[in-house]
Image (spheres, rainbow, N blue to C red):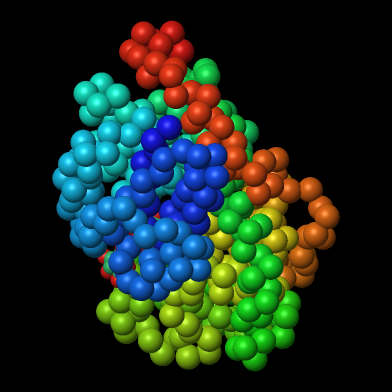
């Protein structure tokens, strides 16, 4: 079975690593395409080195741009690669612009080259169409022949959209495969000690969503809250390039003085830091899941989450909305007080380190199944 796997941006790399490894372990062909949506060494190369991901077979080098420009550049660059490789499967993961761009290209060449499209992390929904990721998620799912879900809520979301049947399969959370594999190395790194922090006595914060960092008032409110928390407990903030640029543009540099500001961290360094934290404050999707598995309290800087299972079966809570520095500080204090989950407490089903095996088994089992046809969609009510 020849499979083409797409990765484009930072949150994709920890998802494709175990899939590539499992494809190879089972003796299947794997071709890796890196779109180049993320390109800084700290946003891309560091993850390849850390996670032992092989060099991409194709690097599209698309870089940054408006949503339209970035998506269009990925599509233009991906089409000839797909025509050259002609895989049985194209696997896209997550919800970034590269995910949708490659899904669109694959769906239009499906019949011509016989490639099918599989989406890993299918079915997640924030129900907030202002998020570019929500558009990417919904459209990618609509185009996919095989929808591989991480949780029961994801399946229910698909059913509510009329997508059901054998092409929807529960596989669990593949990012957690990487977490389980890397945790021993992360613990050896003991990053908190190297930063002079006491284990379980510091907060880790990340913020990069456009809704939080593209507005001066939102970003100022978040930095003000983090500054308040830092009076009680050290706050470490690895800064995403988008956030750094905006903080400079809005003249908010001074409000970072109380925080331990770091460059973006590699995977195991970040895991090491989060594993030792008293709490995490974040707008990242991946960190909501990782903190749930690590048992670390998490405050999500969002109005809603497409990962509700991290609240119902994990350690996550949403910041009160609309967000203000006062309510955010209070919520963080509550999260720290709530304490960490015991190591042996239950975790969401399928977040067990074996998702990649289930993904590759699903690809193998579905390889000769005809693509989803319009008839089939009509029957399932799409
Ligand atoms: C993208 C994803 C988001 C994900 C995030 C993780 C989309 C729509 N968004 O957002 O879902 O949570 O990645 O980081 O795909 N930049 C650099 N160097 C880089 C990459 C980006 O400096 O290596 C800067 C550029 O100024 C760029 C900006 O960050 O314009 C935003 O990058 P972009 O890829 O458009 O989106 P992210 O905000 O990273």
| Residue 283, visible in the rendered structure | no
| Residue 249, visible in the rendered structure | yes
In the picture provided, is 62 more to the left or to the right than 179? left
Horizontal and vertical percent position of residue 97: 31, 49
Q: Nearer the viewer, residue 96 or 80?
A: 80
Residue 183 in the image: above or below residue 195: above
Residue 312 in the image: above or below residue 145: below
Horizontal and vertical percent position of residue 204: 59, 74
Horizontal and vertical percent position of residue 58: 27, 53
**Quarter of the image containing the C terminus?**
top left
Residue at 59 percent across and 36 percent down: it is 358
Quadrant assignment for ligand 1 = bottom left
Horizontal and vertical percent position of residue 63: 24, 62
Residue at 37 percent across and 19 percent down: it is 371
Quarter of the rendering containing residue 312: top right
Residue 233 in the image: above or below residue 379: below
Residue 152 in the image: above or below residue 306: above
**Quarter of the image containing the N terminus?**
top left
Q: Nearer the viewer, residue 146 or 261?
A: 146
In the picture provided, is 359 more to the left or to the right than 196? left
Residue at 73 percent across and 77 percent down: it is 200
Q: Nearer the viewer, residue 57 or 264?
A: 57
């Amino acid at each position: 079975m020849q499979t083409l796997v797409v990765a484009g941006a930072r949150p994709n790399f920890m998802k494709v690593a175990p899939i590539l490894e499992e494809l190879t372990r089972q003796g299947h062909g794997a071709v890796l395409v890196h779109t180049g949506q993320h390109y800084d060494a700290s946003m891309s190369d560091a993850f390849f080195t850390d996670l032992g991901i092989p060099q991409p077979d194709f690097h599209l080098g698309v870089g940054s741009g408006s949503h339209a420009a970035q998506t269009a550049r990925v599509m233009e660059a991906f089409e000839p690669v797909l025509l050259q490789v002609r895989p049985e499967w194209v696997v896209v993961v997550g919800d970034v612009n590269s995910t949708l761009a490659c899904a669109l290209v694959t769906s239009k060449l499906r019949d011509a080259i016989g490639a099918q499209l599989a989406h890993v992390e299918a079915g997640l929904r924030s129900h907030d169409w202002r998020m570019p990721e929500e558009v990417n998620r919904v459209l990618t799912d609509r185009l996919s022949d095989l929808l591989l879900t991480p949780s029961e809520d994801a399946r229910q979301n698909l059913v509510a959209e009329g997508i059901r049947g054998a092409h929807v399969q529960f596989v669990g959370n593949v990012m957690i495969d990487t977490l389980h594999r890397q945790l021993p190395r992360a613990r050896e790194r003991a990053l908190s000690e190297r930063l002079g922090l006491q284990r379980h006595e510091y907060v880790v914060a990340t913020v990069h969503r456009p809704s939080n960092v593209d507005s001066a008032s939102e970003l100022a409110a978040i930095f003000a809250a983090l500054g308040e928390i830092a009076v009680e407990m050290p706050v470490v903030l690895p800064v995403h390039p988008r956030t750094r640029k905006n903080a400079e543009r809005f003249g908010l540099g001074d409000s970072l003085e109380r925080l331990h500001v770091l460059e973006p961290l590699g995977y195991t360094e970040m895991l090491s830091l989060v594993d030792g934290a008293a709490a995490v404050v974040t707008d990242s999707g991946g960190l909501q899941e990782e903190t749930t598995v690590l048992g670390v309290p998490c405050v999500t800087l969002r109005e809603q989450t497409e990962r509700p299972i991290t609240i119902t079966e994990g350690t996550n809570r949403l910041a009160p909305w609309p967000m203000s520095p006062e309510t955010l500080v209070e919520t963080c204090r509550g999260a720290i007080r709530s304490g960490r989950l015991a190591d042996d407490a239950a975790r969401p089903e399928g977040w067990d380190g074996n998702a990649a095996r289930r993904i590759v088994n699903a690809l193998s089992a579905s390889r000769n199944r005809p693509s989803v046809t319009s008839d089939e969609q009509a029957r399932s009510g799409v």
